[in-house]
Structures are given as structure tokens and as C-alpha cells.
Image (spheres, grey):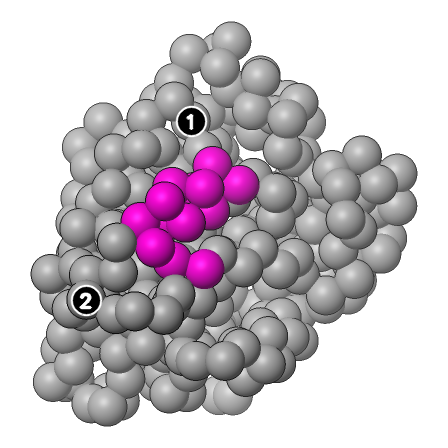
Amino acid sequence: MTSTPIPVVFIHGLWLHASSWQAWADRFAAQGYDPVLPGWPNEPATVAEARDNPEAVAGFGIDDVTAHYAEVIQSLPSPPVLVGHSFGGLFVQKLLGQGLGRAGVAIDPAQIKGVKALPLAQLRSGSPVLGNPANRRRSVALTRAQFRYGFGNAISAQESDELFELWTIPSPGRPLFEAAFANFSRHSAAAVNTANPNRGPLLMISGQKDHTVPDVVTRGAFKQYRSSSAVTELKQFPDRGHSLALDQGWTEIADTALNWLAEKADLKVG
């Protein structure tokens, strides 16, 4: 058990604001962690401000966001735990692969280079961005119906609409293009150093009803770590969709992460 708080950096994905992690931050703080909730580069401080200024985040790509979080990590007094959802899960993997962070939890992580599965549900979820090449330079917002399909398909329509109103913001289209075409790019920003034997432990979490990052995609990413001797584990939740980190069942996911960190990363901080 450690006597000083271990930082934990929460990294959100596309279409959610950093403040959507607040409940997680409170739960981790109650267990003795020191939570940090930085947004993406140029992300306004509130959901309302982000909606009013959608182009503030336009044009940022995977390398830009990774570098931004690397600076956050390096400014902390000690190596943090990294917890990310969706594209945040991809950033967790990239940062751990670079030797940053003491452990990571990647929840329904966006597709990394080397994963070849491309389910129809994933294509439909990405179509609001990928359907127009000009969106690579733009910021894009989801409609209520698009959020329902991509995030809220495993919960009630009412809860999906409530989450949409609470947390959704416009996000840059560029990361989605970079991930979608990663396997056709020699130097893709979506590449992760999965072979690093010296990185911290990594837990991958998959919602098996997820449309945005289907379970087969998370399993494909998990297989990319076969050549690494570092701890890598996968936990699957059969009835959960892409909203699993923020819907009413979020505590099950958060407690899974906390328990795994205590067991596999030896972070008994409470």
C-alpha cells in the first residue's frame, strides 16, 4: 500500500467531454488515487462552451493528442495510471508503448494499426465522419440518433438521450480517418508499440454489444500483444455497449478496473 496518492489520468474519446469522467474521478479518489481529467488540445472547459465553439478542436490528429497527454503525464510528480475510453483507450496504449504511465486500462479502445477486422456496425458508427473526406479537417458533432446507434444501443432510448444531452461535444474528424486507414499507411499515427516488454500492465475492456468498437476489434488489438512479455489482459462484458463507461452500469466497469489495478499492478492505494 502506498502512502502518497498515485495520479490517474482519465482520457476520453471522440464526442465526449473530459468532465464525463467526473464520477470515475470521485470513485478513484475515494480509493486513494489523485485523479486528473485533462481534455484534448484546445478543448473548452465545459460541454456548453465546446458546443458553442466546435472548431476549437478541428484538425487535431492522433499524434497531436498523444503528445498533449504525454506532456500532462510528464508534468505529474510520479508516473500515473492511465484510463481511457474509445480513442482514449488507443492513447493509453500508445503512451504505455512509449514507456509513459505505470499501468493502463483501455475501455473499448479505438482500432490500432494491425487490426484487420472491420465490422459493418463499426463502419456505420464511423459514417458521420468518414462519409465526407472534408471532415478530416473539420470538427463533427453526432445527432441524437447517431449517438444512440454508436453509443447507446445497449441501453434504453431514454438513457441514451440523457447521456447525449449531458456529455456530447463536437470532435475532430482526423483521428477517425487515421485509424480507419492505418493499415494502408506505413507510418500510421494509429501504430502502437505492442512489443514493448518494459511497459506497465494493460487491461483491455470490451463491451460485446459495442457498435463503435465491436468486440472483435478489441480482441484483435489484444492479439497484437502476443510478442510482449508485459502483462496484458482482456475482460469482456457481454451485454454492454460503447456507453459502458458512462451509463448507469459504469460502476461495474470502474470497480473492475480498480480491482485489476490492485491485483495486477499492485496498486493497493486505499
Q: Please give the range of residues in magenta.
A: 22-34
Vertical arrangement, residue 201 with respect to residue 209, above or below: below
Which of marks 2 and 1 precedes in the sequence? Answer: 2
Answer with the quarter of the image where residue 37 lies: bottom right
The foreground one among 226 and 25 is 25
Could you classify mark 2 by the number of other residues whose Cα lies within 10 Å: few (under 14), some (14-19), or many (20 or more)?
few
Identify which amino acid the numbered label 2 is placed on.
Answer: Met
Question: Which residue: 22% across, 73% down?
Answer: 201
Secondary structure of the residue carrying tag 1 is loop
The foreground one among 115 and 9 is 9
Question: Which residue: 14% across, 74% down?
Answer: 231
Give the number of callouts: 2
Q: Which residue is mark 1?
A: 247
User: Which of the numbered marks, if any, corresponds to residue 1?
Assistant: 2
How far across and down, in percent of the image, does residue 254 sit?
A: 31, 42
Is 31 part of what is drawn in magenta? Answer: yes
- In-image side of 69 versus 264 (left or right): right
Q: Are marks 1 and 2 in contact (CB under 8 Å)?
A: no
- In-image side of 204 versus 50 (left or right): left
How far across and down, in percent of the image, does residue 251 sit?
A: 31, 33
